[in-house]
Each structure stands twice: as structure tokens, then as C-alpha cells.
Amino acid sequence: MNLVVDNNRRKLIESMLFFTSAIKNCGKTRLFKLLWFFDEAYVKQTGSVATGSQWLAFPQGPVPGELIDEWGGFGSDINEAFEFRLTDVGKERLAECLVPQRPPDLSIFTRREIQILNDVLSKYRDISGEALSKITHDKDGSWYEVSETQGDIYGKISAEHILLKSPNRDQLLEEARYKASIIEYLNSIATDNR
């Protein structure tokens, strides 16, 4: 059992519940972008992602790799938390929405993570998925660096890409590597003790 992976998966699901509970008819594009802004802001503060997602530079902007792979055939943990529904979002468009089946459990998050979730919601709650997608295509952003500058459509967006223009990049990446080594050690102990 990998405790960190399990915790990251819970944080991913609870952050999805957080956004879909606060925004009626939150479609896939909008949800993916809100999750991106959450992880991006967290990386800029800590050097690592909060949800454990591996972000990919799709043509429409950053997408969480594991969710795009699961979309339409979610695992039981997501199926228990959400109802999948096609919803009329206006302009004769249907959106694939996740309807939360319970409130989010914020106890899994740190105070910093909750603050970032609230900041992202406050800043982007009234912006459409299409407009959020355009924001993620900013020329100073990590999606642009991977997709356009490096020409790596569907490439991985790493913490290094997100921190490319950060003045404390090296320090944050070193802290993230240190944290990852501790987590790896703790997981090895948990595995050895089974």
C-alpha cells in the first residue's frame, strides 16, 4: 500500500468535490482548469503538486493525466462521490458534468491547501471553461513552455516547468526532492511492515 498515492487520490477527489459543490454545472474543461490552478498555485508555494496529478499539455490546456484516462469509466472511488451527467450549459451546448453526491471532506487538506482552494474558487468561479482554457495558454505559463516552445503536445508539465520563472525555483525544487525522499522512505517502511 502506498500511503502517499492513496492520500493524493483522496485530495484529488475532495478537490473535485470542492469545486463541483461550489459551481453548478461544472463541466469537464472547467473542472480540469480549476484543478490545474489549484496544483499550479501549490507548486509555486511548495515545489510539489497537492493532488499528485501528472499534468499533460493537451491542445486545450493542462489536463490531469489520470482523470483524462478515466473520464467516462471512473474507478469506484469517483463513482461513489459523483454522478456523471450531460448537462445543458447554454448556447445549445451539452457539457459532461460531475454532480457531487456528498460534500467535500476538507479535513484531508492543510490550511495552506484550503486557502489555495478558496483563492482559486474566488478568482475563477464565474469564468467559463472556454475562457479558463485561454488563460492557461498564457505565453509566460508552463503549458506554453511545454506545448509551444518545446513542441511537446501531450507532454508532461513538471514542477520544473511551473517554476521556470520563479525567483526561488531551485530552493523549492530542492525542498520537493527532499520531501519526496522522505515519503519514499516512509512508504518503504510501511511496505516492509506488512
Image (cartoon, rainbow, N blue to C red):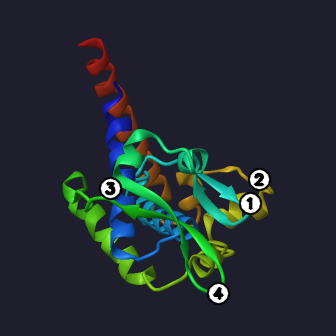
User: Closer to the observer: label 2 or label 3?
Assistant: 3
- Asked whether the beta carbons under mark 1 and mark 2 sit within 8 Å of each other, the answer is yes
Front one among 162 and 10? 10
At a point 57% along the width and 77% down the height, the residue shown is 132
Compare marks 2 and 4 and give the one earlier in the sequence.
Answer: 4
Real-space Cα separation, disc 1 to disc 2, in angstroms: 5 Å
Disc 1 is placed on an element classified as: helix
Residue, disc 1: 147
Residue 85: image location, x then y, percent: 50, 63
Answer above or below: position of 17 versus 180: below
Q: In the rendered image, is residue 145 in sight?
A: yes
**Figure quadrant of the N terminus:** top left
Could you tell me the amino acid type at mark 1?
A: Ser
Residue 183 location (% of width, % of height): 33, 33
SS category of the residue bearing label 4? loop
Task: Name the front one of labels 2 and 4.
Answer: 4
Q: Nearer the viewer, mark 4 or mark 3?
A: 4
Task: Please tell me which of labels 4 and 3 falls first in the chain.
Answer: 3
Tell me whether circle 1 and circle 4 mark residues in contact (CB < 8 Å).
no
The residue to which callout 4 is attached is 91
What residue is shown with label 2?
152
Q: Residue at x 36, y 82 (%)?
A: 122
Going by the numbered disc 2, the residue's amino acid type is Asp
Amino acid type, label 3: Glu
| CA neighbours of label 1 inside 10 A, class few (<14), some (14 to 19), many (20+) | many
> How packed is label 2: few (under 14 Cα within 10 Å), some, or many (20 or more)?
some
Q: Is residue 154 left or right of residue 112?
A: right
Q: What is the secondary structure assignment of the residue under circle 2?
A: loop
Task: Pick out the residue farthest to the left.
Answer: 107
Q: Amino acid at mark 4?
A: Lys
Location of residue 151 (image quadrant) = bottom right
